[in-house]
Image: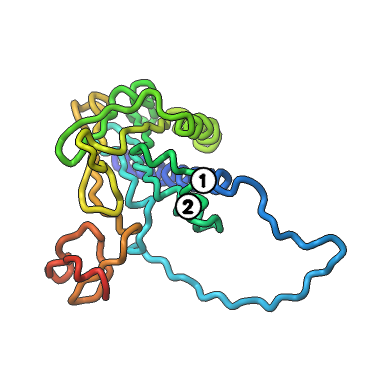
């Protein structure tokens, strides 16, 4: 029974993670587009037939870099489940540009989010028969902290800029309708983008690390979720110099051949 419940909770985590990614990606498109596109045919004129273009299919594999997969971690403490999602600025630009909005337009639309390290989170205690008791959003706001690479800790900003507050307010009812109580208790938290000494805390283009820490929320004093940088989905592809396989951008050694990876291995 315990193994079955654990499997079901993992599936729920993946389902909710996928739904959240789709919802936020779609929301980024509507914000970035700023209205309907132009280019409709003029009334009374027939369109000329257009020859169909042959499209080469893109083959996706488990190794294909994916920003959502790189930025989501499942809550992993006995008797608890949930999701930690770091949502970098690049997510919004990437989601919009994949669906026809220019990167420049999307970056301009979401520029205010660059001032924050944005984290989405939900967590719940799991009962003996699989019932979820979610950690209320007000507890998440107080008990979740950001820890930079030097160990400095930061609490969530209580009053972020209007654009950030509006984004969180707009997403709440959409998430509630999509995933029920999980959406009701999913909280978007805004932390500083820079450390006290002015360094970027979570730059997906630079080598580094940071952690999201849950304090006294899920049965233990601290539950730490670490993100290692840079993100493979964001930076220039990196390859093993021996086997030529594409490797994670934050790896220092190829796990298959044991050879060192450095800046010179960025190109095939």
User: Along the horizontal axis of the image, is 207 left or right of 139?
Assistant: left
User: Along the horizontal axis of the image, is 52 left or right of 164?
Assistant: right
Query: Could you tell me which secondary element the residue under label 2 belongs to?
Result: helix
Q: Position of residue 245 (x, y in %)?
A: 26, 72
Q: Residue 209 or 176: which is nearer the viewer?
A: 209
In the displayed orientation, state which residue is furthest to the right: 44
Query: Could you tell me which secondary element the residue under label 1 belongs to?
Result: helix
Q: Which mark is residue 28?
A: 1
Q: Which residue is mark 2?
A: 95
The part of the image, by quadrant, that contains residue 248 is bottom left
Measuring 54% from the left and 31% from the top, which residue is drawn there? 173
Q: Which mark is residue 216?
A: none
- The quadrant in which the C terminus is found is bottom left
Q: Position of residue 75 (x, y in %)?
A: 29, 38
Measuring 25% from the left and 60% from the top, which residue is drawn there? 249
User: Along the horizontal axis of the image, is 220 left or right of 81?
Assistant: left
């Amino acid at each position: 029974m315990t193994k079955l419940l654990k499997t079901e909770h993992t599936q729920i985590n993946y389902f909710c993670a996928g739904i959240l990614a789709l919802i936020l990606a779609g929301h980024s498109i509507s914000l970035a587009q700023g209205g309907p596109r132009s280019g409709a045919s003029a009334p009374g004129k027939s369109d000329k037939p257009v020859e169909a273009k042959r499209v080469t299919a893109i083959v996706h594999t488990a190794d294909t870099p994916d920003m959502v997969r790189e930025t989501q971690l499942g809550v992993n403490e006995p008797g608890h489940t949930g999701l930690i999602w770091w949502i970098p600025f690049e997510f919004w630009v990437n989601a919009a540009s994949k669906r026809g909005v220019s990167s420049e337009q999307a970056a301009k639309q979401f520029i205010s989010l660059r001032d924050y390290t944005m984290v989405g989170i939900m967590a719940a205690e799991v009962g003996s028969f699989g019932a979820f008791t979610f950690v209320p959003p007000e507890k998440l706001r107080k008990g979740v902290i950001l820890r930079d690479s030097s160990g400095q800790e930061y609490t969530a900003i209580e009053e972020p800029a209007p654009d950030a507050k509006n984004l969180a307010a707009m997403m709440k009812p959409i998430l509630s309708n999509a995933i029920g109580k999980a959406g009701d208790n999913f909280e978007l938290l805004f932390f500083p983008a820079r450390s006290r000494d002015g360094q970027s805390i979570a730059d997906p283009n630079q080598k580094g690390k940071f952690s999201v820490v849950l304090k006294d929320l899920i049965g233990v004093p601290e539950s730490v979720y670490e993100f290692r940088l840079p993100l493979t989905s964001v930076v220039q592809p990196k390859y093993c110099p021996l086997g030529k396989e594409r490797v994670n951008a934050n790896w220092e050694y190829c796990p298959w051949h044991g050879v060192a990876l450095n800046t010179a291995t960025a190109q095939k």
